[in-house]
Image (cartoon, helix red, strand yellow):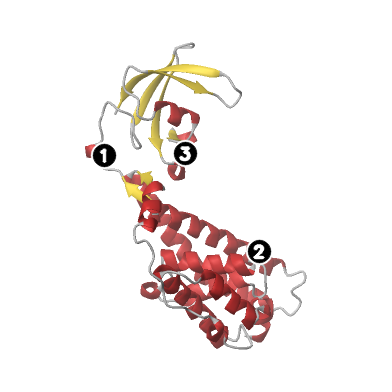
Amino acid sequence: MTQVSESLTVLEAVGVYAGSLRPKDGVQTESHKQLLRFVSWCGAGRKISELAPSEIGEYSDQSSGGTQSAERLQEVKKFLAFASKQGLTEQNLARHLRIRKARSRAKLSGEDERRASLIELTPEGHKDLVAELEDLKAQRGPIAAQIRSAAADKDVRENVPLEAAREHLGQVESRILEIENTLTAAVVVDPSARKKSTVQVGSRVWLKDLSSGRENQYTVVSASEAKPLEGKVSDESPVGKAVIRRREGDEVDVQTPRGMVVTYSILKVA
């Protein structure tokens, strides 16, 4: 592992750690977010072998406070212990991660924040994101193996396979975090509970351009589900914002990217 440890970045080491875990022991949403916070704090491109004990102590001091912080720091401690065992660091940096006892804090503050940032997903959209997340997590192990194999080349200055594997891992980890953040804040809408005459997330909407007479059909979804070419428009898009919570028979104005305003009539909501 000597040559690997000389070239692995902190982000790559996290990827190797996650890829080494059994499915039932895999890095879960909150712990994964904490590991990526640690990566961001250290610098994704920083060599893990360069981390100093004083830096780990500083990180724990800045991150301490509250029950959740203490629990999440445990994940970083597990990762640092793994890095030491695998020879990625010269010493066990986990010993320098100080986890203070949690102080009492307002119990509802975190929940209030979560409610304020809820994302509505359709059942289909939620299923697709879960499937994509599982596929991305399955890629961690093979990518980590590619990194180890490519890093075995002593000359890493112009090691194209190593750089490609590193970039791929970064993209995978970034997308995993994005999906996990979405799923954490997600509420799956119940189609049967939706008011059929009012446009909501998951509604199909038939619109008529009052100037040209042209008719279009859209499905209003969350930003994470949007696929304009398939007629799925985000509730944050100009069309989505204009029609959300409106009813059949309403006329709405939509401002196009070019600054023009188009008036539509909502023909039908389903």
Looking at marks 3 and 1 on the same chain, the residue that comes earlier in the sequence is marked by 1
Q: Dot 2, how many residues are within 10 Å of its Cα: few (below 14), some (14-19), or many (20+)?
A: some
Disc 1 is placed on an element classified as helix
Under mark 2, the amino acid is Ala
Disc 3 is placed on an element classified as loop
Looking at marks 2 and 3 on the same chain, the residue that comes earlier in the sequence is marked by 2
Give residue 207's quadrant in the image. top left
Q: Nearer the viewer, mark 3 or mark 1?
A: 1
Task: Give the residue displayed 46% in from the left and 28% down from the top.
Answer: 239
Q: Dot 1, how many residues are within 10 Å of its Cα: few (below 14), some (14-19), or many (20+)?
A: some
Marker disc for residue 164 = 2
Residue designated by label 1? 191
Spatial CA distance of label 3 from label 1 is 19 Å
- Indicate the position of residue 195 as horizontal and vertical percent values: 25, 31
Total tally of numbered discs in the picture:
3
Q: Nearer the viewer, residue 132 or 94?
A: 94
Give residue 224's quadrant in the image. top left
Q: Is residue 6 above or below residue 28?
A: below
Q: The N terminus lies in which quarter of the figure?
A: bottom right
- Indicate the position of residue 184 as horizontal and vertical percent values: 39, 56
Labels 2 & 3 near each other (Cβ < 8 A): no
Decide if residue 168 is on the left or right side of residue 113.
Answer: right
Decide if residue 266 is on the left or right side of residue 238.
Answer: left
